[in-house]
Image: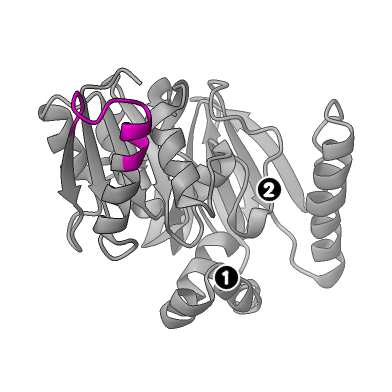
Amino acid sequence: MTNSRIGVVINPSKLDRGDLEDLITKTLKAAGKTDSVDVQWFETTEDDPGLGQGREAVEAGCDLVIAAGGDGTVRAVSEALAGTGVELGIVPRGTGNLFARNLGIPLVSMRAAVKRALTGTASDIDVGWVTVDDSGKQEAFVVMVGFGIDAQMLAETDSELKARAGWMAYVEAMGRAVAASASVEATLTIDGGKPEKLRAHTVLVGNCGMIQGGITLMPDAKPDDGRLDMIVVSAENGMQWMETLRSVVWDNGLIKLLMPGENTSSNGSLQHRTATSMRLELPSPQPFEIDGEEVGEVACFEVTLQPGALRVR
């Protein structure tokens, strides 16, 4: 542990600051660093989930910034730190905790997560950037973005049930999401190539492959491989949904777990692609998600990749 100044960006609605301060102090004391490390605190707000606070921490000279909160806080702080060389630690206290889950960061024990954040070794992780509706405004993502059943599920999730039941609220919303998701004709352009027409109700572009509930949609996705993975789901009837489910759970789930060298399987209703950039144009606005958070409806989105832009413990 060499950090002399640590910034903690905390979402006060997700955890108690006093509890986190106590754990950080005890961990620093155990490492004999209590007197030599300056810890600065930055609380998120309803209007700013962490981007401004992360930038403040960088400007204050912090060489480690800990994001303590849910996926929204982690994503916002990641955007602030991308390309700066400042290391990111994560104390996951949200519902999905998608980035932490994909990186193997402790989810249940806050003590273990704090220890990892303060003493872990940093690795370079890719960062994706998405622009929606040709707005010119780029937003970072570290897990995945897209439209369709995943975004629809987030839109259908009851916020009160989510607060009480955690990720099980997503399961409750899945049936409504499937019913609400309709296939559309879209135009896809990959790596600046020739535009192609496709019909789908779900397109997800991922830096990581795991979603809520520990389901791995993109088994080949690695956050440090300099590539983005993509799935296109076009299942519309019961038989096609069974085929898709089998592919996710069996062919690309259990089989790849037991035999990692097996190729990822595609079929008529589930395609796997890779890219470093892509653009998708939709015939009408559809629910859209960024790193597990529903952000409204979009008619087109463009994605690029910034390899190795984020140093994460």
Residue at (69, 32) in percent of width and height: 220
Residue 306 falls left or right of residue 174? left
Q: Residues within 10 Å of mark 1 (few under 14, many from 20)?
A: many
* Disc ID at residue 170: 1
* Nearer-the-camera pick, 165 or 302: 165
Q: Which residues are magenta?
A: 26-38
Q: Tag 2's secondary structure?
A: loop
Residue at (64, 77) in percent of width and height: 179
Residue 57 at x, y = what percent? 16, 34
Residue bearing mark 2 = 217
Q: Residues within 10 Å of mark 2 (few under 14, many from 20)?
A: many
For the residues carrying marks 2 and 1, which lies nearer the camera in this image?
Answer: 1
Note whether 297 is above or below 229 in the view shown: below
| Separation of marks 2 and 1 at Cα, in angstroms | 16 Å
Whichever of callouts 2 and 1 sits on the residue coming sooner in the sequence is 1
Residue at (45, 56) in percent of width and height: 289
> In the image, is residue 29 part of the stretch drawn in magenta?
yes
Residue 9 at x, y = what percent? 24, 45
